[in-house]
Amino acid sequence: MSKHDRIQMQIVSSCSTFGIHALQEYKGAGWRADVLVRDLETPIAFEIQLSPQSLSKTLQRQSKYIRDGVTACWLFENPVPKLINERPDLPVFYVEEAADSSLHVNLGKRRKLPIGSFLENFISGRIQFKDGIQTSSKQSVNLVFYEMQCWKCKQINHLYFIDSPFYSSCGAEITPDEALWDSSSAEYFPEIIELSKKIAEERKDLNLTLATIKERHSYTVDKSYTSFGCSKCDSIFGDFYVMQGKIDQMYGPKDLMCSGEIELNKIKSLSIPHWCFPNGTNYCGK
């Protein structure tokens, strides 16, 4: 039996397990679904696409389902070329075969579900499309500390950067772009500052002398912004030098990396469209 046939039979079998009748090779007006679940308010067609197919061809085929009031869910084996963002009119997921030959469906690398669990949750509407991603309130964070000598008093200070992404409740990685002069840098979140202080207090063996964080005026750029500064003389560490120190550490040995748990005081949001299926009950967005 081919892989395509195995997946097709698995869909039919799984649907039968939770009391839904599924039809194989169902023909419509200009389309033929690998599997069609017809007895729903909105019928769902499952298309198994293991061979390469362009985005334009996929959209062309999808338009016929939309025309006939059918939701078509695509199970690809490989990424769809030029499909950069997930979209509500094109449910695309990725089917994988495990070492034990069991089949799983990957939700955009956020979660991987056994195919039966995926089908039950998609058909029941528990896998929902959301326009934005929101951070989960609880996060595990890696902080990398590095030394910087004060340009004025020569005091050695320890700065840090975050070496781990934030995650949404559905498992999506959130790595917001940060402008060089942006005071909203995640390193300056109050929760992160408190974590750095906690690590310095608990890990006396590291001899961390934390640079202080507050708003300071920079004569170089003639503006005030939140910044790292010397713990002894309070001189500002310019963002250019902070960024340079961070880059040097990012690609070198991270000898002073520590981990901790935080709870975000405020949920952070990004405009990342995605098919959302959280571990709990909190979906991204409203």
Image: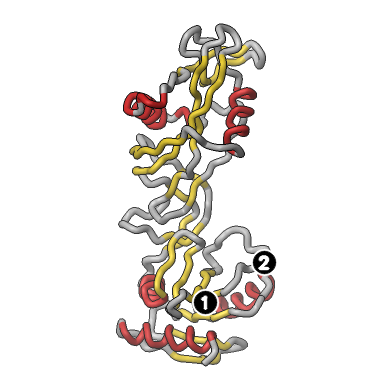
Asked whether the viewer can see residue 186, the reply is no
Which one is in front, 143 or 167?
A: 143
Judge left or right: residue 92 versus residue 207: right
Question: Around disc 2, counting alpha carbons within 10 Å, would you say few (fewer than 14), some (14 to 19), or many (20 or more)?
Answer: few
Whether residue 33 is situated above or below residue 42 in the rendered picture = below
Judge left or right: residue 218 versus residue 285: right
**Residue drawn at (54%, 41%), measured in percent from left and top?**
176
Amino acid at circle 2: Pro
Give the mark, 2 or 1, whose residue is nearer the N terminus: 1
Kindly indicate the quadrant of the structure image that contains residue 171.
bottom left
**Residue drawn at (59%, 37%), measured in percent from left and top?**
252
Residue 194 position, x and y percent, is 36, 27
Q: Which mark is residue 81?
A: 2
Q: Which mark is residue 133?
A: none
Residue 97 position, x and y percent, is 49, 76
**Residue drawn at (47%, 19%), measured in percent from left and top?**
211
Q: Secondary structure at mark 1?
A: strand
Kindly indicate the quadrant of the structure image that contains residue 116.
bottom left
Number of marks in the image?
2
Which one is in front, 263 or 88?
A: 263
Which one is in front, 261 or 10?
A: 261
- Residue receiving disc 1: 72
Q: Secondary structure at mark 2?
A: loop
Residue 11 position, x and y percent, is 43, 83
Asked whether the viewer can see residue 18, the reply is yes
Whether residue 145 is situated above or below residue 127 in the rendered picture = above
Whether residue 214 is situated above or below residue 28 in the rendered picture = above
